[in-house]
Amino acid sequence: MRQVALTIFVVLLMGSVLFIANGHREILDNEVSAYYLQNFTSDTGAGNAVAAIYLNYRMYDTIFEALILITSIIGMLHFFRAGGNK
Amino acid sequence: MIEAILLLLLILLAIVAVETQILRMAVVFLGIFSLLLSFLYLYYGAPDVAIAEAVMASGLVTLLYLTALKRYRVYNICFTNQMFREVDDRYIVEGTRRGQLLHEVEQFCISKELEPQVVFTPEDLETLMETRKYDLIIRQEGDQLTIYGSQENYFVDELEMLLILRYQDLNTRFMRYAEDGSFVEES
Amino acid sequence: MKQEASIVSSITGLLYPFIIVFGIYVILNGHDTPGGGFQGGAILAVLFIGRYIVAHADDFNIGRAHNVEKALLAVLILVPVVFVFGSLSRRFPQYNQVYLVFMNLLIGFKVALGLTVVVFRYAFYEDR
């Protein structure tokens, strides 16, 4: 009984979220994206807007992503030290 | 049109991957799921994300899952019953002593870091032995329970000791088969 | 999986150069076409891992790869700090493309080594 009620609740919640979000078109920071799309070639010399953003405008993001990768690898090497060849 | 077909296929594959009994097939379905998802990203005009998804999710992650499955071995147990054409879970689970035995076998598998996977089938023994899909076959004929295990598998010996100690009242016996399929007589 | 499957290993041997070329192409053209360091690095990592799975090549040194990766991370942090945050990209706009290609190369090799270390360490050496 409880499971049935939970299932119905989850399905209703999911349906309402989808129904509300269906007609929703939100674009955040309209001016910023328009500026990037107009000026990325002259600013950074890239032909691909994605590369211009992740290597120049949003450089912090890339640096800390690399840090996350190396931190996870260090953690894994630390915790799996028993056995295997280091 | 293409978008709708891809989205419906994604939902279908996700459900199939969750509902599949065999874990290996579920991993393969997940790989197909990621590949279709990367096509969808390409359709939406994000080729960068599509490349990353295709390489990571359907290449590396599938590989990782498969190797993890190989390490965490699955132990296939087959429960067969000649008397009933249709064996279902209810028959074995409903608090009988045999249900306890099956539960005990599963617990033993978990303690040995194997993942038990029980299949109920009304097929007869010969076809089961031919396919060689199962590591352990439990066969019920009336009151007689027979457990078939491979001769090389030391795991079956331990299981035999355990079950004989605890389930003396059940009419249980063990049979071993050699690599070529012939039965080995117990001394 | 102990013995090699000859069909798979010979076909994969045929595919190695194409995988290398494709990965480096994706990295080097990341600033102009879709792709980039991360995607190309993942493709190169698939090359290393496939080499292990098919041919059981056991000569990959995890410790050395990890050290190289740390050095690459140091360069990866240093270069944009000098070039972008030091506003050299405004003063010398002709080096912008060089910077992009260099960064993509660094990220690509770092990701390739990192993913290879992860997969090797987690999947293949743990059961010894």
Image (cartoon, coloured by chain):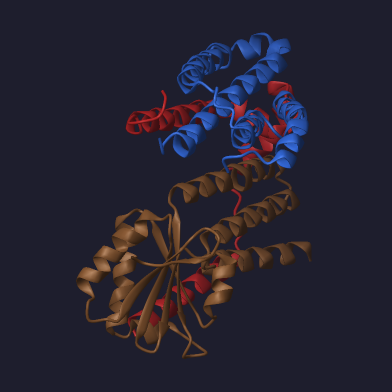
> Horizontally, is B164 left or right of C39 in the view?
left
Q: From the image, which quarter does the N terminus of chain A lie in?
A: bottom left
Q: Which chain is brown?
A: B
Front residue (pair B13, B145)? B145
Question: Residue B22 at what x, y percent from top left?
Answer: 53, 64
Quarter occupied by residue B97: bottom left
Task: Identify by letter the chain in blue.
Answer: C
Residue A25 visible? The answer is no
Q: Quadrant of residue A10?
A: bottom left
Residue at point 70%, 36% (across, down) = C9
Viewer-side residue, A81 vs B179: B179
Depicted A7 relative to depicted B165: above or below: below
Does the image show residue B126? yes
Q: Residue at x 59, y 28 (%)?
A: C57
Which residue sits at x=26%, y=64%? B161
Quick one: quadrant of the C terminus of chain A? top left
Q: Position of residue A3 (x, y in %)?
A: 37, 79
Q: Is residue B106 above or below residue B57?
A: below
Q: Tell me if B158 is positioned left or right of C92 in this view.
A: left
Please, is residue C85 above or below residue B160 in the view? above
Relative image position of residue B137 (x, y in whole percent)? 45, 71
Q: Residue at x 41, y 39 (%)?
A: C127
Q: C91 or C120, which lies in front? A: C120
Number of numbered labels in the structure image: 0
Q: Which chain is the one coloured red?
A: A
The quarter of the picture where residue B101 lies is bottom left
